[in-house]
Amino acid sequence: MNLSRGILLATSNKGKLKEIRQILGEVVHVQFYTLSDVNAENFDVEENGKTFKENALIKAKAYAEKFGFVTLADDSGLEVDYLKGAPGVKSARYAGTGAKDSDLYNKVLKELKGVPSEKRTARFKCVICLYDPEDVSYIFSEGVCEGVISTIPAGSNGFGYDPVFIPDGFAPKTIAELDPKIKNSISHRGRALEALKSKLLQN
Ligand code: IMP
């Protein structure tokens, strides 16, 4: 894998871009390109994989082949054990297209109504794929943040399912009640980036 020509970051999420630059920038001293740098904002990829890993690969490969850069893509979401791993890869569209964050987490709360705390275990998972279109090589890294689903939403930081996710070690606070710096230090995405950083350091 040759990173010398730079890395295309296949996300338009500003928070993610900042985190990627911060963590990977420590070991990878190359140019990072955003989607707007390569006029890729309107390029759409259907994420039809069955796992986070499949979707991360689908995305990274599609952008890498289309734009010719080594590309970093991620896929993430929430897995609830009692719901047999749902919302999983459907996390963003669990309550239908165009649903608000509150529709998403209220659906999960409704499905867990009356379920005791020891059966409310869940995790945020993130898989990152770095794909090189020249030698058709790719690497994955994964990060997980374990916790339980609360019974009522609380907090206003973060996004998505944060108001109903209580990370292990922080009860009774949800992620949405934690300082964003703490979230970054325990987040699935942060951990996946740290794991990728270690893999790149080994190479
Ligand atoms: P994506 O991988 O950024 O597309 O995330 C898919 C969906 O998973 C998001 O729309 C959120 O609903 C959920 N999700 C992913 N990461 C987080 C997080 O850190 N907090 C809350 N929800 C998240």
Image (spheres, helix red, strand yellow):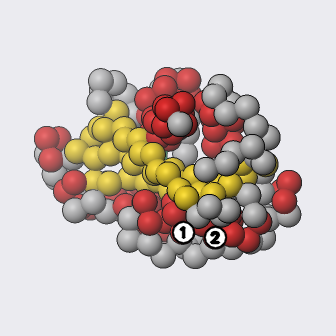
- 116 sits to left or right of 20: left
Q: Which residue is mark 2?
A: 62
The one nearer the camera, 87 or 7, is 7
- Please report the residue visible at 57 percent of the width from the left and 52 percent of the height from the top: 130
- Residue 35 at what x, y percent from top left? 78, 57
Badge 1 crowding class, 10 Å Cα cut-off, few under 14, some 14 to 19, many 20 or more, is many
Is residue 121 something that shows in the picture? yes
- Please report the residue visible at 36 percent of the width from the left and 38 percent of the height from the top: 145
Residue 50's place in the image compared with 16, above or below, is below
The one nearer the camera, 119 or 195, is 195
Residue 199's place in the image compared with 77, above or below, is above
Badge 2 crowding class, 10 Å Cα cut-off, few under 14, some 14 to 19, many 20 or more, is many
Q: Which residue is mark 1?
A: 58
Identify residue type, mark 2: Ala
The answer to whether marks 2 and 1 mark residues whose Cβ atoms lie closer than 8 Å is yes
| Quadrant of res 21 | top right
| Quadrant of res 38 | bottom right
Query: Please, what secondary structure does the residue beneath circle 2 have?
Result: helix
- 13 sits to left or right of 103: right
- Residue 85 at what x, y percent from top left? 27, 60
